[in-house]
Image (cartoon, rainbow, N blue to C red):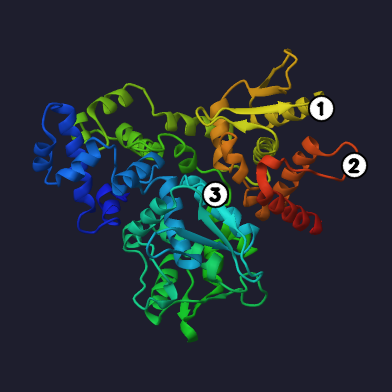
Amino acid sequence: MVSRFVSEKELAKTYDPEQGWETVTQFREAKQLRTEEPDIARAEIARRVGRKPSAVRGWLVEGKTPQVVKGLRVARERGWLNIESTSERFRAFNQLVAWVFAGGGLANEVFVPVFSVDDHVTLAALHQLLQWANIPYQVRNPKESHHALEVKPREDASVCGRVLHVLGAPRGVKAQQESLSLPSYLNAVSKEHQRDFARVYVLNRAKDRDSSGTAGSYVHGLSSEQFAHEIQTLINSTTSGKGTVGAEQRVWVSSQSMRDLAETEPFQPALATKIAFGSLTPPTERALASTYRRTQTPGGYRSVQLYTTVVESDQSRAALADQYPDLSEAMVQSWRRGQKPYAQRAITTAHDLGWIMPAPESEIASGLTALLAWIMRRGSVRPDTHYPIFPIESAAEQVVLEDIGDDLGIPFHVVRREDNTKRSTEMRPAEHGALLGRILRTLGAPLGRREANSCLPPVYLYQYPSHADQFITTWQQLWTNNDEESQITVPTRLGDRFSEAFEQLMAKHLGSQ
């Protein structure tokens, strides 16, 4: 059963617990009255909505909008309201709440969230979550070298923090909160989401995750013994191992629990990959479906679930529409006559092509990684259609791309520039282009040029050396300096953070060979 989180009313109360929602309803009613009855006096509008005439004058004459109304508008536009528990966006928000508990915080008065990261692996995992949650961000270097990097929303930070607070993220200094408690929604969501929450906690707070010996680890820095017992219960209820509360409010996470959460070793990149993608073999069905209807109800993956329910049910159209509020009788009739949601058609085609959860060592998985490197290095995915564009600069690059297309089961066609402009010759998928773009999006491809300055090499590259090799090799093929073949350059549009992460990835990968 789907649940929805963060209602307008709940968010409005973060602005004013007593009058936040009342202000919203009064503002909307005043606007509606002015539209429906343009000749009515402002004093009468004020009387009807129960607000002072001066406030109504500000709304209707001076163009003023209450902060709470602006906040709801931002949240709606970004898809932060009524988040469906079945969506990839909720999977991201659930883990961002966990990150606030484990490695971050919310400013007590202004609600601005901060997420701490220790290295490029954890930053890459956090980046993927923020991308799914539609949260552009900035990274601030610590003043002292032993402190962690700080990641903050670049836009609408206060609204974002309020959304996280509605979900249960605490405000203020957590270490000083003896009554700190895990979010109540965890009791109402699937074990999968509970395990995601636990993974984020272990990734951020566990010490010596990949040490030899027992492979267990202490989760440290808990605010109280009561909270330590809550973390212990979370570990015990979501893994086949055990958590044990020890001295100094630490929780020992057994090796069995660590292996259960990470599914493979080494623990850190495995945990980070599971956090970022929900699978060690991305992309998943849910991720692909969630690229459809991102701000609509029902969302992409929810529409797939409803479609399955409809085609497998013998109930009447009226009964189904009554049972599932998101369904209309017209939708039921359309689906039973052979129509399918766009997300369902995408999943079916992606399965046919082998693009859903391909084996890590397969040619398909390697080909998708190569195309992801191509997009980050030189290409683009259009924000409106998800259609990918692959510029080429030589016949050799055309051959490389055609070979990748053969591995993925799609042909490419060439669009040549003959108008003496500086625009490159492009190669575009002749079939399933938008679907390919959505697949690449789920793996971390930026949408358009605007997102390019905050993209990072995907975290699964740290988990799979073969994919790191494919990513680096593709990059070398596309941007090796002709005068010095050993030198690899990174476009300035990707920013310093990408350059640093790429350098670290190359050093780690080449050093292990």
Q: Residue at 27% of width from left, 28% of height from top?
A: 332
How packed is label 2: few (under 14 Cα within 10 Å), some, or many (20 or more)?
few
Q: Residue at 31% of width from left, 51% of height from top?
A: 6
The part of the image, by quadrant, that contains residue 119 is bottom right
Q: Residue at 38% of width from left, 27% of height from top?
A: 340
Residue annotated with mark 1: 396
**Frontmost residue, 239 versus 85:** 85
Dot 3 amino acid type: Gln
Element type at marker 2? loop
Residue annotated with mark 2: 484
Q: Is residue 47 left or right of residue 237?
A: left
Q: Position of residue 405 (x, y in %)?
A: 68, 28
Label 3 near label 1: C-beta < 8 Å?
no
How packed is label 1: few (under 14 Cα within 10 Å), some, or many (20 or more)?
few
Spatial CA distance of label 1 from label 2 is 19 Å
Residue annotated with mark 3: 128
State whether residue 98 is above or below residue 299.
Answer: below
**Frontmost residue, 364 versus 153:** 153
Q: Residue furthest bottom?
A: 247
Residue 337 in sight in this render: yes
**Frontmost residue, 385 versus 460:** 385
Count every numbered label the image shows and give the total: 3
Spatial CA distance of label 2 from label 3 is 34 Å
Dot 2 amino acid type: Glu
Q: Earlier in the sequence, mark 1 or mark 2?
A: 1
